[in-house]
Image (cartoon, coloured by chain):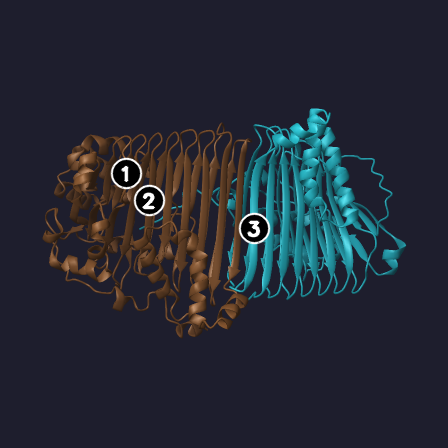
Chain colours: A cyan, B brown
């Protein structure tokens, strides 16, 4: 019996005419341009994913197709006066489709840390090893047409006290395609703070970040999204963790109109570990769609995930989380928890924590809840004389803080300040 | 794979236990394959009213037009050859009214299963579906006195056409999915039950289904209506002999629990491991009604079954309690679907699965809370146990919440049959096999507890059978 697809596949109508010009203008090696063309050809053969796939059930993939050729024209960066004098090992700013500035502390420079423009220095053997160019259509668009990329490489055994900051400032209009590659050589230890700001109602941002965690290396990665209203954005971030490596991801999503994040870790080597802690706060008509993946490909790997979502107004959130234990990955442990707090009648949350377990020697659990504000707690706080709004803020803060409290101190303080600011903005 | 061969495969000794075959003895057997002629023949043979004939034909068009599911075990699904299936056959010409009149070879089949003789006194009525037609049917006098209707679906349509016309396909529309359309086109047999208002049926109503012809499809159709304040427990059980080629079972079961009514529907399916068991089961629960699906999946090659409850009236309650056992080559893709449409409705899903030696168990669930259904509570709990090499378990729970004043909880745990537990039990003098069986029994105990005694015994016997040879 013939079986047709339920809906005709939608084609991705996107011209990438300016690849050659883009590549030569940024001084890329020929091999990189060739790679872009290969990714472009890959994209040309793709259709938009079916909405019946759970990964795209809640967000229309069509939102992430640029309305015009992203390789043409120039991007105007939102001008910002950004002064953050907190200590850092390095700071790179991506804006207007290019790396605008790179600062490196003396400590980092002496240790041999590299923070540089990815266009000129992309290690072709590593690019695409955590997020393959054909991962999906968004990743293929980025692989073909990324502009404004940063490479961070921390040498073997180097431990940095201060974070490496990568700041991506979205343009007021047009398509931003940042790309970040972090290489943590064996035994290195450091923190990366990737933040996304700026943008406007005409902005589309499609980011790909790859983090390669070498043997025994430890990377703390903070992914903070604070776009202006109206931004439509997609972010794919994957860590590939070698034996005994540790990847610790802190995820905080606040801004934009439509935001889909696909983040996670591939535990490729034995005894590798990944932890993901995250909060998302939605208001207005914001639409969040977070997908996390912890793929246990090797024995004795461990992962933990705790993701909290608080929603007000008409905002909505979808969360899908996948834990996958490969057949050869014995003695793994994996835990996953997603809790959603609905603060208004019209807020809406979906939660799909998934498990695929192909090895019997495993310890694994997940949990998810969706619940309204606890009226009793609210009543209690109000009976103590707290005004309604303040009581609400306290409860939300308490809800999110259970997760934030599990973060390293510096990260926690940073995120707590952002949560507090967001709470007071509502 | 080679290492698994040393273990007794799932259902490996089926032939000795259940693998008896009676010579095919058919009065009517449709040619293989499906088209409008076959549908016409089925409807004409059954002397059905015009509306049902039309419904069947429309359903066939829907079935042919609908694509196969784009999710689930696509590899296994793609192996179903719809052209190789016989869509209708009937082994005896007329309904039997007493056990004595049931043909000897059919009785033998049931005797081998150890079912009716020992338990007949417990049974309110037996609807034994042998091939595609109900061959044995007895309704206790008491039930008749109570005004309870307990018929096979074909008789239900003949004798209570108005009721059937009102409710047939009202819970599961013909076009709900490809397989509900298939069933609607070629359905045969199944049960039709109506419980009058404020009537409590104290003994479970039972039906036994069997498949006994090669490439034989079973498409039974069950409709249960519990009127206001009525209470009923229906039990469907099935065991099938082994056959060499693939077979399809695709039932549709619709339950309607009116205001304050209670329906419990218990199934333990133990189809032979060559059977594709693709079943649509859904209930509607009105105000203060309660619907419980107790669902056990032991057999079949692939089962795709997600018993559903639509909580339509205030304070209605829905429950799905299920176990799945997946041995080598089996995929139990089972779960539950609960839709909260009304305020203060509550639901609970408890799923337990065991994957053993290459078997795969999947929990696939959906909890929906529609806007306006305030004060709802729902909790989902999935536990999976993995035994042996190559076993796989998946959990795909979906929660869609449109209302803020609800509490939704989901939890899942996966564990392997623990060495520590085994060591402890062995130190108490149990053999390895005994210890494993004891752990598995403990794991499924919450399910077994909900079964009538005779079923609990049968299930424990089945689990014991499946666990044989799991040492190592």
Which residue carries the number 3 mark?
A366
The answer to whether B215 appears left or right of A111 in the picture is left
The earlier-in-sequence mark between 2 and 1 is 1
Crowd rating for badge 1 (residues with CA inside 10 Å; few <14, some 14–19, many 20+): many
Tell me if I can see residue B191 in this picture.
yes
Furthest toward the front, the residue is: B428
Instruction: Give the chain letter at badge 3.
Output: A
Crowd rating for badge 3 (residues with CA inside 10 Å; few <14, some 14–19, many 20+): many
For the residues labelled 3 and 2, the Cα–Cα distance comes to 29 Å
- The percent position of residue A266, horizontal first and vertical second, equals 62, 58
Q: Are marks 2 and 1 on the same chain?
A: yes
Q: Which mark is residue B265?
A: 2
For the residues labelled 2 and 1, the Cα–Cα distance comes to 10 Å
The answer to whether B82 appears left or right of A219 in the picture is left
- The percent position of residue A137, horizontal first and vertical second, equals 57, 47
Q: Are marks 3 and 2 on the same chain?
A: no
Mark 3 falls on what kind of element?
strand
Q: How many marks?
A: 3
- The percent position of residue A80, horizontal first and vertical second, equals 80, 35
- The percent position of residue B74, horizontal first and vertical second, equals 40, 54
Which residue carries the number 1 mark?
B224
| In the foreground, B4 or B150 | B150
Crowd rating for badge 2 (residues with CA inside 10 Å; few <14, some 14–19, many 20+): many
| In the foreground, B240 or B214 | B240
Q: Quadrant of the N terminus of chain B?
A: bottom left
| In the foreground, B20 or B39 | B20
Mark toward the viewer: 3 or 2: 2
The answer to the question of whether label 2 and label 1 lie on touching residues, with beta carbons closer than 8 A, is yes
The answer to whether B439 appears left or right of A161 in the picture is left
């Amino acid at each position: 019996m013939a079986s047709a697809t339920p809906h005709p596949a939608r084609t991705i109508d996107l011209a990438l005419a300016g690849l050659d010009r883009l590549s030569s203008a940024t001084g890329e090696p020929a091999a990189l341009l060739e790679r872009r063309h290969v990714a472009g050809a890959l994209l040309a053969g793709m259709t938009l994913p079916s909405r019946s796939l759970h990964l795209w059930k809640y967000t229309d993939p069509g939102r992430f197709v640029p309305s015009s050729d992203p390789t043409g024209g120039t991007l105007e960066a939102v001008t910002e006066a950004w002064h953050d004098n907190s200590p850092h090992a390095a700071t790179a700013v991506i804006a207007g489709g290019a790396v605008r500035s790179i600062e490196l502390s003396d400590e980092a420079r002496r240790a041999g840390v590299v923070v540089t423009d990815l266009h000129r220095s992309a290690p072709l053997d590593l690019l695409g090893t955590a997020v393959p160019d054909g991962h999906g259509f968004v990743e293929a668009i980025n692989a073909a047409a990324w502009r404004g990329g940063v490479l961070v490489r921390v040498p073997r055994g180097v431990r940095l006290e201060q974070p490496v900051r990568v700041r991506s400032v979205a343009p007021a209009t047009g398509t931003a395609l940042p790309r970040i590659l972090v290489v943590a050589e064996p035994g290195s230890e450091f923190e990366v703070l990737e933040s996304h700001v700026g943008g406007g109602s005409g902005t589309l941002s499609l980011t790909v970040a790859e983090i390669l965690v070498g043997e025994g290396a430890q990377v703390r990665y903070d992914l903070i999204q604070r776009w202006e209203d109206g931004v439509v954005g997609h972010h794919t971030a994957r860590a590939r963790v070698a034996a005994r490596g540790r990847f610790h991801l802190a995820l905080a999503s606040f801004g934009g109109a439509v935001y889909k994040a696909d983040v996670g870790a591939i535990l490729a080597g034995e005894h590798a570990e990944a932890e993901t802690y995250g909060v998302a706060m939605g208001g207005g008509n914001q639409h969040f769609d977070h997908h996390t993946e912890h793929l246990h490909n090797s024995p004795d790997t461990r992962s933990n995930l705790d993701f909290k979502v608080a929603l007000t107004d008409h905002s909505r959130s979808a969360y899908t989380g996948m834990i996958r234990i490969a057949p050869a990955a014995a003695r793994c442990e994996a835990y996953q928890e997603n809790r959603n707090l609905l603060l208004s009648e019209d807020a809406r949350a979906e939660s799909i924590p998934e498990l695929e377990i192909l090895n019997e020697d495993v310890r694994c659990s997940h949990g998810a809840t969706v619940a309204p504000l606890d009226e009793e707690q609210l009543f209690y706080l109000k009976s103590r004389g707290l005004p309604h709004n303040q009581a609400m803020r306290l409860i939300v803060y308490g809800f999110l803080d259970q997760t934030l409290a599990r973060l390293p101190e510096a990260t926690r303080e940073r995120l707590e300040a952002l949560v507090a600011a967001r709470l007071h903005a509502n | 794979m080679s290492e698994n061969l040393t273990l007794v495969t799932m259902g490996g000794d089926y032939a000795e236990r259940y693998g008896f075959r009676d010579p095919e003895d058919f009065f009517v057997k449709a040619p293989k394959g499906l088209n409008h002629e076959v549908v016409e023949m089925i409807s004409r043979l059954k002397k059905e009213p015009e509306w049902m004939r039309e419904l069947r034909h429309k359903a066939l068009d829907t079935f042919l037009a609908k694509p196969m599911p784009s999710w689930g075990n696509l590899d296994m699904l793609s192996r179903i050859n719809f052209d190789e299936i016989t869509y209708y056959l009937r082994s005896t010409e007329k309904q039997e009214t007493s056990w004595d009149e049931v043909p000897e070879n059919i009785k033998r089949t049931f005797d081998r299963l150890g079912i009716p003789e020992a338990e007949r006194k417990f049974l309110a009525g037996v609807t034994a579906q042998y091939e595609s037609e109900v061959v044995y049917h007895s309704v206790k006098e008491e039930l008749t006195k109570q005004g309870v209707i307990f018929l096979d679906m074909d008789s239900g349509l003949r004798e209570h056409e108005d009721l059937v016309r009102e409710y047939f396909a009202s819970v599961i529309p013909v076009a709900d999915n490809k397989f509900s359309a298939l069933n609607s086109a070629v359905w045969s047999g199944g049960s039709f039950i109506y419980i009058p208002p404020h009537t409590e049926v104290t003994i479970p109503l039972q039906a036994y289904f069997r498949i006994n012809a090669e490439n034989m499809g079973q498409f039974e159709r069950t409709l249960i209506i519990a009127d206001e304040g009525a209470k009923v427990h229906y039990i469907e059980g099935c065991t099938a002999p082994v056959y060499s080629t693939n077979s399809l079972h695709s039932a549709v079961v619709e339950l309607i629990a009116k205001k304050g009514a209670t329906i419990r529907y218990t199934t333990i399916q133990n189809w032979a491991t060559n059977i594709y068991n693709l079943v649509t089961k859904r209930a509607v629960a009105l105000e203060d009604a309660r619907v419980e699906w107790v669902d056990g999946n032991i057999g079949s090659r692939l089962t795709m079954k997600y018993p559903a409850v639509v909580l339509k009236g205030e304070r209605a309650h829905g429950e799905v309690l299920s176990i799945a056992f997946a041995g080598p080559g089996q995929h139990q893709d089972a779960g539950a679907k609960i839709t909260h449409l009304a305020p203060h409705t509550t639901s609970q899903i408890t799923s337990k699965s065991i994957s053993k030696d290459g078997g795969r168990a999947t929990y696939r669930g959906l909890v929906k809370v529609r806007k306006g259904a305030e004060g709802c509570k729902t909790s989902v709990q999935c536990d999976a146990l993995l035994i042996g090499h190559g076993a796989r378990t998946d959990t795909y729970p979906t929660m869609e919440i449109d209302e803020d004043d609800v509490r939704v909880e989901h939890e899942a745990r996966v564990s392997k049959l623990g060495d520590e537990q085994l060591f402890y039990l062995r130190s108490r003098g149990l053999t390895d096999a005994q210890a494993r069986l004891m752990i598995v029994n403990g794991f499924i105990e919450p399910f077994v507890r909900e079964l009538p005694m005779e079923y609990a015994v049968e299930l424990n016997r089945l689990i014991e059978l499946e666990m044989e040879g799991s040492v190592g």
